Image: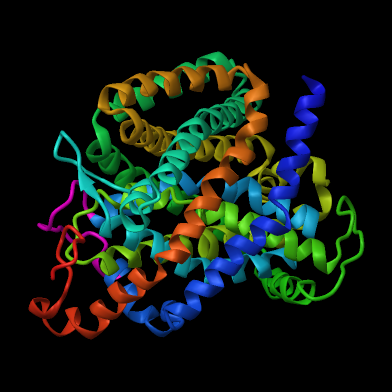
Amino acid sequence: MEQFTEIIAKVTEIVWGLPMIILLLGGGVFLTLKLGFFQFRHLPHILGETLGKMFKKSDHPGSVSPFQATTSALAATMGAANIVGVPVAIALGGPGSIFWMWIVALIGMATKYSEVVLGIRYRETNEKNEYVGGPMYYIRKGLGWKKVAYFFAFALMLEIIASTMVQANSVAETINGSFGISPLWTGLVVMLLVGMVIIGGIKLIGKVTEKLIPVMILAYITGVLTILIINISEVPQAFLLIFEYAFQPISAAGGFLGAGVAAAIRWGLARGLYSNEAGMGTAPIAHSAAKNDHPARQGFWGVFEVIMDTLVVCTMTAMAVLTTGAWKEVGPDSAADMVPTAFATIFGSSLAGSIISLILFFFVITTVLIIVYYGEKQAEFLFGRKFSLFMRYVYLVAIVLGAIGGLKFIWQFLDLLLAMIVIPNMIAVVFLSKQVKSITDDYFKNYLHGESESKYRGNGEHQE
């Protein structure tokens, strides 16, 4: 088993190295060029249609509001990737890695937008009259690649098992360290809370995430802003570190071991891609349930997600660990402790640990909520609604098993299964980029001048 695990680890390391960076970053650049840099040219309009209409109700076809769909998708990306992933990037790639994280976010906006647009364009209604969609639908209907669509759905359905276990374990260990609560009890509480909400489907999930996600983001940002205000004199130096060491090596300092430019690029790109999930194909599953009057309009919320997740929250995390010097005090092996260390400089060790633990707890709750929904939709796509209910119980059991650290060998497959969903999704999005461009052009050339001229309607179907 140990030899098998080593093989899996080596294969995963190779796949998630240069090949995946080329696919995700190259695909994002291609889509950015194809769409004429729309995420930059139309940014004011995009923000006006998202931030400017955040709480506006919609009477268009769909199961949840555009904002609820967005907070549901954000629930899957907000959490460990923001609080733990950023310190890991800095520990292994230096402060310069944050610059490359920004670059991948700016490019990833086009990818996330394209995925969401395609999710709306090819969505369907299931037997409960709920809107369902995602890569499995646009791969099957848009390209006619039925086997690839089934492969994607099967790989994601399995990946959710490992992902759920890892999420549950991370929060159980954190709660145990801060409050001394047994991982088993944490696992049971998480399972109970998730089970109570998931039974209500995407509508109840949307209502919960709509309330929890903004509160958690505001709570975390408030904590970081407190740190930055007290260390305001260090903020310019922190930005200088990011820009300076994005293009030149940085030597060792304290617990930091030093890093070259290649390491800064590699970890910045990898953490950025992992943080906002652009290209993974998961976000369009949540967005496909949204009420909307044009696929492009919902796509703008995909751009908003990347801005909030990577450009706002990840940057705040970076600023906290850089301005307090936590990145020099904590070594790479304990990178996850950088944020609590940064908070401890202001709030004290005990309170800082409690704050981060509680924030992570609620982040994980919402993350598990939406990824279990993702898993159920794959099971429904493959084998029907009854099987999706069976998988719900599998995921709920996985929460408890993961919390107590059981079946850890399954965790080894997490990144490999993730690659198996990213590869077919990115290829499909690139192949369907002509559709995305047509929808985008229709929105800016026709829709804004009068809905009657638009080729698309609320359900995303092309009107001949």
341 with respect to 303 (left or right): right
Residue 223, x across and y down, in percent:
54, 52
**Residue 56 lies in magenta, yes or no?**
yes
Q: Main secondary structure of the magenta part?
A: loop
Task: Pick whichever, 46 or 16, lies toward us.
Answer: 16
Residue appearing at x 16%, y 34% in the figure: 127
Q: Which quadrant: the C terminus?
A: bottom left
Residue appearing at x 28%, y 28% in the figure: 384
Using the image, determine if residue 104 lies above or below residue 244: above
Residue 431, x across and y down, in percent:
44, 65
301 with respect to 407 (left or right): left
> According to the image, what is the colour scheme of the structure?
rainbow
Task: Pick whichever, 294 or 302, lies toward us.
Answer: 294
47 with respect to 415 (left or right): left
Magenta-tinted stretch: 52-65
Q: From this viewpoint, is residue 373 visible?
A: yes
Q: Which quadrant: the N terminus?
A: top right
Using the image, determine if residue 392 lies above or below residue 241: above
Residue 411, x across and y down, in percent:
64, 29
Using the image, determine if residue 300 lies above or below residue 189: below
**Residue 451 lies in magenta, yes or no?**
no
Residue 50, x across and y down, in percent:
30, 67
- The quarter of the displayed image where residue 253 is located: bottom right
